Amino acid sequence: MLADLVAGALHDASDRRAGRGLAEVEAAALAREPAIDALVSLAPADRVKIIAEVKRSSPSRGALAEIPDPAALASSYERGGASAISVLTEQRKFGGSLADLEAVRNAVRLPVLRKDFIADPYQVFEARAAGADLVLLIVAALDQDDLQGLFTLTRELGMTALVETHSADELSRALDIGAGLVGVNARDLSTFELDQELFGRLAGHIPSGVIRVAESAVKSAADVAHYREAGADVVLVGEALVTGDPVRTLAEFLAV
């Protein structure tokens, strides 16, 4: 599944590049105002922080919410106390787009994450050109040279990489490139199976000074509390927010 998602994302990026070349996108990226420092916004605090996600659908759950106005949803997340906004820009399985990200960027003052299957520098430049402050880099989707190269480019553009892991080996690879924001995804992107205990098993291996993000398997405040007790500084939440009252749900999650 992960290989198919990456291949589809690269194919779609190639189609976009045919209409808007790398030089044009790079110029647009460099012309943007400086990115918001997400490491400051997501720094550990007395209470858990939430990255709230704009997510219409997923391969594992199918359609979740229509979200006709991503900007309005993101604004509700900001009012509800989220520390950053994640926007799915993958179209084939998640129903997202870069236009969603641009709309969200124009609506909120929070850091905005481009969540996609990024494997080419063009996608990183696109992210910055659209106003992203963070990009997702999935260790399982990249060899180490590509991971390092995309991570370095992300930093050179003033953005932050959320480096996503799903095993001790992947965590080691993330730390080797100097990641300061590390995610542990409870969902195996090859099988889409969930293991909510994975974060707890890996969190102790994430050194002090690296922000720890728990991803997936969050349906209730109890799930947020579970991750917080296991050492999460930040929890990324999508489905539970788009399928309910986002402000009320955020209040419940932030109260743990």
Image (spheres, rainbow, N blue to C red):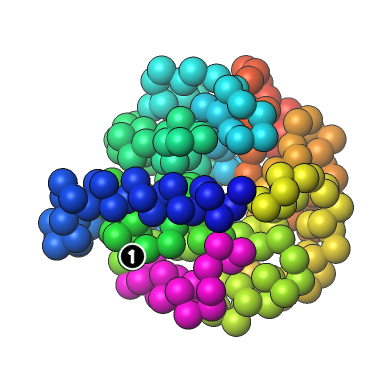
Q: Position of residue 246 (x, y in %)?
A: 60, 23
> What amino acid is at disc 1?
Pro
Disc 1 crowd rating (10 Å Cα; few below 14, some 14-19, many 20+) is some
Q: Nearer the viewer, residue 120 or 207?
A: 120
* Residue at point 28%, 52% (across, down): 14
Visible in this render: residue 5?
A: yes
Q: Position of residue 103 (x, y in %)?
A: 32, 32
Q: Position of residue 228 (x, y in %)?
A: 79, 50
Callout 1 secondary element? helix
The verdict on residue 1 being magenta is no
* Residue at point 67%, 70% (across, down): 170
Q: Is residue 237 above or below residue 118?
A: above
The verdict on residue 149 being magenta is yes
Q: Image quarter for residue 82?
A: top right
Q: Quadrant of the C terminus?
A: top right
Q: Can you identify the residue that label 1 sits on? A: 121
Q: Is residue 216 above or below residue 147?
A: above
Q: Along the horizontal axis of the image, is 36 left or right of 29? A: right
**How many labels sit on residues?**
1
Q: Image quarter for residue 249?
A: top right
Q: Position of residue 117 (x, y in %)?
A: 48, 52
Magenta-highlighted stretch: main secondary structure?
helix
Q: Bounds of the magenta span?
A: 139-156
Visible in this render: residue 32?
A: no
* Residue at point 81%, 38% (across, down): 223
Q: Nearer the viewer, residue 17 or 157?
A: 17
* Residue at point 72%, 74% (across, down): 169
Q: Nearer the viewer, residue 50 or 167?
A: 167
